[in-house]
Amino acid sequence: MRAIRRILVAVKDPGARTLPAVAKAVQLARALSAELELFHAIDSPYYIDMLGMTADRARGMECDERGEYLQRLERIAARARLHARKVTVAVEWDYPVYEAIVRRAVKIGADLVVAECHAGRRTAPGLLRLADWELLRLSPVPVLLVKRTRPYHHPTLVMALDPSHAFAKPAKLDAEIVQVGSAVSAGLRGKLHAVHAFATVTAGMAGPAAATGSRVYEAAAASARADLDRALRSTDIAPACRHLVAGDPTTSVRDTARRLGADIVVAGAVSRSGLKRAFIGNTAERLLDCLSCDLLIVKPEGFSNSVPRSARGARLVAVEPLG
């Protein structure tokens, strides 16, 4: 992955009293000497009276509404410019919002997307098409999902690594996670940890089987430790900050993040579909619910972007006259 030089922050509501995603994006932009763009997608339907609305008038109203959002973003940008070297704003009529964000990120060559995380639990997120879940799934650009409102102050980052490449995960994904995690940690002057969860087969064993199981466990742990050290060979992370945990990846990452008081968990995501997704699941998606801290999602190099490049424009809905 290249260095983070351009950050796109998706502003869900430019009129909100607090904007934690913007505040943290500004911190990152300043720490990494990156440019920042504040972006808002207008995805609400535009209702048109079939008898009384001309095409020119409809375009004029779209332009007026876009201008109002631009003014709101400019007010936010004016404050952000006190801390970041370059801040621009953009508003597009486009939908759905997660596709609009991906399109904009690709268009401006963003190296990182920052967005607020959807509040509450995600029951069937794929059916509800929640923006953060879809961003995680579709974005070829790393995405920082902000869950906490308080700003970063020498944050603790935990990188969730899988150097054993379970379920055919790309071998270079860990390298991407390490590169992004290291850059963010260094920029924010934080503390960097790494965690690797490995599978065990010793539960419920007793007697002679337990002794055999103990040897199997020790061998698995030694192999996992070697894999983790190899994944971190380009870093100076101390042994005390390299955490090896036996068990389910989601639970292990969650528990380690809680124990360390993590501010950001950095994890990789591979977009899957169909029965493969249902059978294997996706650790990054499950972490959305179980983590209380921010989540930085990284995709493997060469991730295929399936989002169409062309913006959809305003979603026009014709209203039939009554009677």
Image: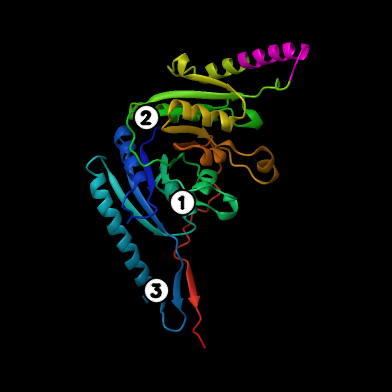
Identify which amino acid the numbered label 1 is placed on: Arg
Residue 171 showing in the rendered view? yes
Of the numbered discs in the image, which one, if any, rests on residue 277? none
Q: Is residue 220 magenta?
A: yes
Of the numbered discs in the image, which one, if any, rests on residue 155? 2
Q: Position of residue 270 (x, y in %)?
A: 58, 38
Asked if residue 271 lies left or right of residue 53, the reply is: right
Location of mark 1 (residue) = 103
Identify which amino acid the numbered label 2 is placed on: Pro
Seen at 65% across and 31% down, the residue is 168
Q: Which residues are magenta?
A: 205-222
Name which quarter of the figure residue 155 lies in.
top left
Identify which amino acid the numbered label 3 is placed on: Ala
For marks 3 and 2 on the same chain, the one whose residue lies earlier in the sequence? 3
User: Regarding mark 3 in the picture, which secondary structure is present there?
Assistant: helix
Eye-nearest disc, 1 or 2: 2
Mark 1 → mark 3, Cα distance in angstroms? 24 Å
Location of mark 3 (residue) = 58
Q: Is residue 287 above or below residue 75?
A: above
